[in-house]
């Protein structure tokens, strides 16, 4: 089992170590599954509302521009033909869902791989009593400075919803706060530093084990 030191909110070691479950924080990186999970997450975030109008949707064009024969010009039935300026679009995008899905076991494996990769890099830090008394941005900045992550992409994982931590980090560039119930592969991999609440470790292991 990988062992990591426990830190306080100021970035100092408490002298305590915590053992992380091998099955969750020590698995071999599966690139194919992780890639599939990231693609799924990004696809599910797409709105799919992009659209264009076909010739039947463009206003006007009900009258035939000129008679069929005898003018010397090409036949035309509507000024809203795709061949005309102001006409409809051929084969344009239509509103649709870009959603993808993965089996639950594969999704959980991808999260385990992402967490294990951060442990292997030494980029995952376990923080004891990760909470603030009030929503203050300066408290979050002070904590990140203690972990030398003030100018890095950082992910803060709290034990359940923590409004004070979320609001304190909301205005800091490159920083994101998540509940342990909202873990996702992209945010974990995208972060250069992951601050994980000590109380959240047991819950994460319980869900992913």
Image (cartoon, helix red, strand yellow):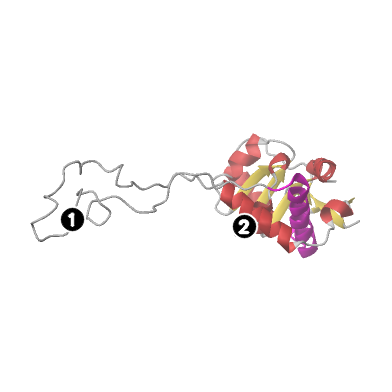
Magenta residue check for 20: no
- Mark 2, residue position: 153
On the image, the x and y values in percent for residue 60 come to 21, 41
Main secondary structure found in the magenta portion: helix
Relative image position of residue 74 (x, y in whole percent): 16, 59
Tell me the magenta residue range: 102-125
Structural crowding at the residue carrying mark 1, measured as other residues with C-alpha within 10 Å and reported as few (<14), some (14–19) or many (≥20): some
What element does badge 2 sit on? loop
Note whether residue 123 is visible: yes
> Which residue is located at x 87 percent, y 52 percent?
23
Which label number is shown at residue 18? none
Residue 117 location (% of width, % of height) = 76, 61
- Numbered label attached to residue 75: 1
For the residues marked 2 and 1, what is the alpha-carbon distance in whole angstroms?
61 Å
Q: Which residue is painted at 59% across and 39% down in the image?
A: 167
Between residues 106 and 156, which one lies in front from this camera angle? Answer: 106
Question: Which residue does the image show at 12% across and 54% down from the upper left?
Answer: 69
Quadrant containing the N terminus is bottom right
């Amino acid at each position: 089992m990988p062992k990591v030191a426990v830190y306080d909110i100021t970035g100092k070691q408490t002298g305590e170590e915590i053992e992380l479950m091998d099955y969750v924080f020590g698995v071999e990186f599966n690139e194919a599954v992780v890639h599939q999970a990231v693609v799924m997450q990004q696809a599910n975030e797409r709105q799919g509302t992009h659209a264009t109008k076909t010739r039947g949707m463009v206003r006007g064009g009900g009258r035939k521009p000129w008679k069929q024969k005898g003018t010397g010009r090409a036949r035309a039935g509507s000024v809203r033909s795709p061949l005309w300026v102001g006409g409809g679009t051929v084969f344009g995008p239509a509103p649709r869902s870009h959603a993808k899905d993965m089996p639950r076991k594969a999704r959980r494996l991808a999260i385990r791989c992402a967490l294990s990769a951060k442990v292997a890099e030494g980029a995952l830090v376990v923080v004891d009593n990760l909470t603030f008394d009030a929503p203050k941005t300066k408290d979050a900045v002070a904590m990140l400075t203690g972990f030398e992550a003030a100018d890095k992409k950082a992910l803060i994982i709290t034990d359940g919803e923590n409004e004070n931590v979320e609001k304190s980090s909301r205005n800091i560039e490159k920083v994101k706060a998540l509940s342990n119930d909202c873990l996702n592969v992209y945010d974990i991999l995208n972060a250069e530093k992951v601050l994980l609440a000590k109380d959240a470790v047991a819950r994460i292991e319980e869900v992913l084990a």
